[in-house]
Image (cartoon, grey):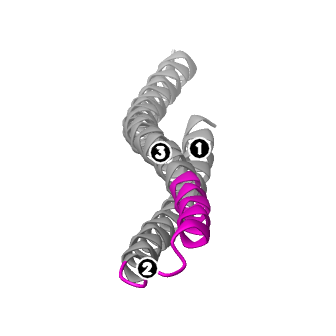
Amino acid sequence: RNAIEKSLTEANESLASARAEAASASAERDAISRRASAAEERLFATYTESHGVRESLEAAKEQARISQQRVQSLAEERDELLARVQASETQVPQLEHELAAAKEEARFARESMERLTASAADLGAELQAVRASAAAAET
């Protein structure tokens, strides 16, 4: 009878220990789930932000293309006008001013595109880090 009671006591202790381990594992699983959810939210936010940067980059590229075409067009126009009105020195400075303004626009567009490209690269690296964190959290 003592052996049975001892065996029953040991079984109850073992059951209590197993329940405690199960509760600990459940708490750990919940913590991992919360971290994974937070990582997914950060990933989505980063994706949304990178999509906006990508759209801005495309817009900057288009603006640079338009500005470059404008520079080319103004250069051609200037050449035609200079050929036709060589004696008119009052028109030459005005055309050169317009060309300089167009070149400044093109320079600004190129600089904007470079900044946006750098931002996109930074966001890409951050997205990779978030993905790695999410993958680590899932395991």
Q: Which quadrant holds residue 135? A: top right
Where is residue 60 drawn, in percent x and y? 47, 52
Main secondary structure of the magenta stretch: helix
60 and 19: which is toward the camera: 60
Q: Residues within 10 Å of mark 1 (few under 14, many from 20)?
A: some
**Dots 3, 1 in contact, CB < 8 A:** no
Question: Residue 74: where, in percent of width, then height?
Answer: 52, 61
SS at badge 3: helix
Between disc 1 and disc 2, whose residue precedes? 2
Task: Identify residue for label 3.
Answer: 50
Q: Residue at x 43, y 47 (%)?
A: 56
Q: Give the alpha-carbon distance from disc 1 to disc 2, as whole Å.
A: 65 Å
Position of 139 with respect to 110 (left or right) is: right
Q: Which mark is residue 88?
A: 2
Residues drawn in magenta = 69-90
Residue under the point 40% across and 41% down = 52
Q: Comparing marks 3 and 2, which lies closer to the viewer? A: 2
Q: Residues within 10 Å of mark 3 (few under 14, many from 20)?
A: many
Left or right, 38 with respect to 78, comes to left
Looking at the image, residue 35 sits to the left or right of residue 57; the answer is left
Cα gap from disc 3 to disc 1, whole angstroms: 14 Å
Q: Nearer the viewer, residue 138 or 62?
A: 62
Residue 110 figure quarter: bottom right
Q: What amino acid does circle 1 point to? A: Arg
> Residue beneath label 1, please?
131
